[in-house]
Amino acid sequence: MGKYFGTDGFRGEANKNLDYEHAIKIGRFLGWYYGIRLGKKAKVVIGKDTRRSSYMFEYALCTGLMASGADAYIMHVTTTPSVSYIARVDDFDCGIMISASHNPFYDNGIKLLNGNGEKMDEETILLVEDYIDGKIEVPMAERDQIGRTVDYVAGRNRYIGYLISMSKYSFKGKKVGLDCANGASWAIAKGVFDALGAKTYVINDSPDGFNINTDCGSTHIEHLQKFVTENRLDIGFAYDGDADRCLCVDEKGNVVTGDHILYIYGTYMKERGKLINNKVVTTVMSNFGLYKALDKVGIEYEKTKVGDKYVYENMVQTGNRIGGEQSGHIIFSKYATTGDGILTSLKLMEVMLAKEKPMSELAAPVVFYPQVLKNVRVKSKPDAQNDPDVQAAVANVTKELGDSGRILVRESGTEPVIRVMVEAGSEEICEKYVDSVIDVIGAKGHLES
C-alpha cells in the first residue's frame, strides 16, 4: 500500500482526507501517462456511486484528464464492476470508479482500473502518488490536444445486456428481493431481474446523496431478512454501495455469506467438471466451517491475505476460477476481473434453478464455527508478531485445537494493532485461547501503554 492508495483505492472523508485537488491531480497524471506521454490521446471511462460528493470528484477528474489531453467517457451512476467490464471490452486505457464502497456517505474514494478492468498495478499507483506530492511534472495539453467529455451511459446499458446474457435460465415464477443500499445498483439490478422474468421486490432504491449504506444493504442485512420472510420470497440479495459485493438471504431468512457462496458455486462447478485445479480461493478470514465443508466434498482451497485484490492475484497466477471473501466479494474469473455483486446473485440463481433446490438446502453443509476476534494495540506489530514466546503460544493453541478449530494472528494493515482470532466448537473455548495469546503479548511488554 502507498501513501494515499490502499488495497481498494484512495479513500477518505470527502474534502478532508480526499479533496477535489487530489482528484484533479489524479486525472492530470492519468491523462498524460496514458496519452501524451505515448504520443496519443488517452481514453478513460469514469463511473460513480450515489454519494453527493461523487459529482464533485467526477468533474474534478474530468478537468484533470482533459487538461492533460485525455477524453473522459462518463458512465454516470453505475457500479464498480460495470466500469471494470467496460474498460476491458470497449478498449479504454484505464477506468476510474468514484466510490467508498460500504462506507458512509461522507466518505468517498477513487479506484483506478487498468485497461483489462483489473485493479491498477502498484508501480503505476506509486507514480500517481509521486505526482500528487509534486515529485513529477506533467505538461498541459495545448490547442488541439485538449481533451473532451463524452456522455457514455451506453456503456452502462451494454453492461446490463451482458448481465442478462449471463443467465442460462428464466427466473419466471421466482420471487426475488433486492436491497440496493441506496447505491449504484439501484438503476441496474431490478431491470436485470425483471428482464429475466423474476417477480422483483426492491428496497432501498431511492438514493438522495446522503443515504447510501445508511441502515441498509449488505452491511445491514437484517432488513432484507425481515423483508424476505414477511413477503414470503424465494430469495433475497443485498449489495453494498458500489455493488461489487453481494450477500444473500434464503427463503427462511437465514444469511448466506460469501463463504457459503464459495461453497455453493464451487461444488456446482466441480459437479460439472468446471472447477479448474479443483480449488477455491479464500482469504485467511474465511470461517473454519467452510474448509470443513470443502474437505467433505473433496475440494481443495488456497488462502490469501485479506482483500479481493489478493484473491484475484492468486487466481491470475494459478488459473483458479472462483474465489472471494466472506463479506461477499466473489470473483468469477471466466466472466469478470473484479467482484461483481449482481453477477454473483445471478450465479446463485443459476445453481438454485439447475439443482431445483431452495437456497437453504444448498447452503446447509456450511456450518459456521463460533468465532472470537480481539484487537490489541501494540508498540510494534513486527516485534509482537515475531516474538518467540508469542509464536510458541500460538503453536500451542494450534496443537490443542487440532482439527476442531484454528487460530489466526495477523497485523492490521492500517493501525498499530494485532488481531487475534480463534474459531472452535464453542465461544467459551474461543475466548480461552484468544486470551491466552493476548496474555503472552502483554507479559512480554508489547502492549501499547
Image (spheres, rainbow, N blue to C red):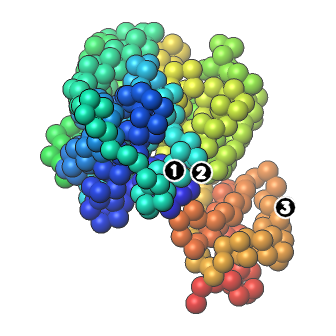
Q: Relative to the observer, which residue lies in front, 122 or 177?
A: 122
> Are there few (<14), some (14-19), or many (20+) residues within 10 Å of tag 1?
some
> Are there few (<14), some (14-19), or many (20+) residues within 10 Å of tag 2?
some
Measuring from the top left, give residue 257's x and y in whole percent: 50, 41
**Residue at left offset 54%, top offset 58%:** 2
Which quarter of the figure has residue 239?
Answer: top left
Q: In the image, which disc is placed on residue 399? A: 3
State the CA–CA distance, disc 3 to disc 1. 46 Å
Viewer-side label of 3, 1: 1
Q: Is there any visible trace of residue 291 in the rendered image?
A: yes
Q: Mark 2 points at which residue?
A: 306
Q: Do the residues labelled 3 and 1 touch (CB within 8 Å)?
A: no
Q: What element carries label 1?
A: helix
Q: In the image, which disc is placed on residue 127? A: 1
Q: Which of marks 1 and 2 is nearer the N terminus?
A: 1
Q: What residue type is labelled 3?
A: Lys
**Residue at left offset 73%, top offset 76%:** 383
Which quarter of the figure has residue 265?
Answer: top right
Query: Looking at this rendering, what residue extends furthest in the bottom direction?
Result: 449
Viewer-side label of 3, 2: 2
Measuring from the top left, give residue 196's x and y in whole percent: 32, 13
**Which quadrant holds the C terminus?**
bottom right
Q: Earlier in the sequence, mark 3 or mark 2?
A: 2
In the rendered view, does 215 fall on the left or right side of 369? left
Residue 251 in the image: above or below residue 381? above
